């Protein structure tokens, strides 16, 4: 978890690593990340996802926020490792 910036109104821009996933079949994969630098996440700004070996990933859908835990769903191919991070705005 990393604080990337502090806004004038006191809100924080922070990032966190997602839980690594290894899909066994092509389909939707649930992503979660706990942003420990925040007490409450307000908005997910960006997802940075990679698939090893390199495979096409769809956009993250069904984004959810509960306190400082963020999540979403992405369509991924089978046989690789999905990893990455997300950038979040909160306080």
Image (tube, helix red, strand yellow):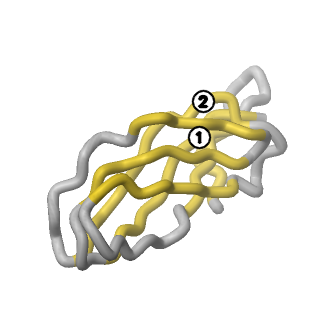
- Kindly identify the residue that appears in the image at 79 percent across and 37 percent down: 40
14 in relation to 80, above or below:
above
Could you say where residue 78 lies in the image, as x and y percent from the top left? 24, 71
33 in relation to 47, above or below:
below
43 in relation to 54, above or below:
above
Could you say where residue 79 lies in the image, as x and y percent from the top left? 24, 78
Left or right: residue 75 versus residue 2 is left
- Kindly identify the residue that appears in the image at 76 percent across and 53 percent down: 37
Which one is nearer the viewer's eye here, 28 or 7?
28
Which one is nearer the viewer's eye here, 25 or 31?
25
Could you say where residue 67 lies in the image, as x and y percent from the top left? 79, 40
Q: Say which mark, if any, is on residue 23.
A: none
Left or right: residue 64 versus residue 73 is right
Q: Which residue is mark 2?
A: 43
Residue 82's image quarter?
bottom left
**Badge 2: how crowded within 10 Å, few (<14), some, or many (20+)?**
some
**Residues at badges 2 and 1 in contact (C-beta under 8 Å)?**
yes
**Badge 1: how crowded within 10 Å, few (<14), some, or many (20+)?**
many
- Kindly identify the residue that appears in the image at 25 percent across and 63 percent down: 26
Q: Which residue is mark 1?
A: 88
The quarter of the image holding the N terminus is bottom right
Measure the alpha-carbon separation of dots 2 and 1.
6 Å
The quarter of the image holding the C terminus is top right
Could you say where residue 21 lies in the image, as x and y percent from the top left? 44, 71
Left or right: residue 80 versus residue 60 is left
Sequence-first disc among 2 and 1: 2
Residue 7's image quarter?
top right
- Kindly identify the residue that appears in the image at 71 percent across and 37 percent down: 41
């Amino acid at each position: 978890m990393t604080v990337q910036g502090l806004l004038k109104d006191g809100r924080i821009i922070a990032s966190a690593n997602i839980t690594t996933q290894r899909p066994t079949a092509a389909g939707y994969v649930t992503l979660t990340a706990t942003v420990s630098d925040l007490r409450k996440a307000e908005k997910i700004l960006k997802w940075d996802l990679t698939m090893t070996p390199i495979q096409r990933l769809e956009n993250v859908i069904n984004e959810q926020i509960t306190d400082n835990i963020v999540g979403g769903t992405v369509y991924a191919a089978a046989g690789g490792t999905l990893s990455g991070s997300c950038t979040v705005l909160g306080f």
